[in-house]
Image (cartoon, helix red, strand yellow):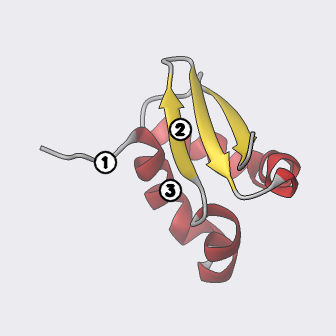
Amino acid sequence: MSSLTVWDQVLSRIEDQVGKHSFSTWFKPTTLLSDAGQTLSIRVPNPSFVEWLPKHYSVVLSDALRVVRRPDVRLVFVPEGT
């Protein structure tokens, strides 16, 4: 049985699509805080990620969520320290 979180599954789908450098910079430092059904709260290192990820990767994120059968999930990025 797999112990991967839905966010781990999303990240595995994204890694090949965005390239190694972008993945290491923008996705590797993120972690799942909570899965509340319709909302995934994702811990990010700083407030820059809160704006950057949805602005530049919304399509990739949406596609990955669809593939892992969570197409209607809302992502909430929460910077460290909040």
Report which residue position mark 2 lands on. Answer: 33
Q: Is residue 33 left or right of residue 61?
A: left
Image disc number at residue 11? 3
Q: Distance between the Cα atoms at labels 2 and 3? A: 14 Å
Relative vertical location of residue 14 with respect to residue 55 in this rendering, above or below: below
- Label 1 sits on what residue type? Leu
Mark 3 crowd level (few <14, some 14–19, many ≥20, 10 Å Cα)? some
- Depth check, front residue: 67 or 1: 1
Lower position in the chain sequence, tag 2 or tag 1:
1
Q: Residue furthest front?
A: 81
Q: Mark 2 and mark 3 in contact? Answer it, CB < 8 Å.
A: no
Relative vertical location of residue 39 with respect to residue 55 in this rendering, above or below: above
Mark 2 crowd level (few <14, some 14–19, many ≥20, 10 Å Cα)? some
Q: Residue furthest bottom?
A: 21
Relative vertical location of residue 17 with respect to residue 20 in this rendering, above or below: above
Report which residue position mark 1 lands on. Answer: 4
- Depth check, front residue: 32 or 75: 32
* Tag nearer the camera, 2 or 3: 2
Q: For the point 50% across and 31% down, which residue is it?
A: 34
Q: For the point 61% across and 33% down, which residue is it?
A: 41
x and y, in percent, of residue 58 in the image: 75, 45
Lower position in the chain sequence, tag 2 or tag 3:
3
- Label 2 sits on what residue type? Leu
Q: For the point 59% across and 22% down, which residue is it?
A: 72
Q: Is residue 51 left or right of residue 23?
A: right
Lower position in the chain sequence, tag 3 or tag 1:
1
Q: Mark 2 and mark 1 in contact? Answer it, CB < 8 Å.
A: no
x and y, in percent, of residue 77 in the image: 72, 40
User: Which secondary structure, mark 1?
Assistant: loop
- Label 3 sits on what residue type? Leu
Q: Distance between the Cα atoms at labels 3 and 1? A: 10 Å
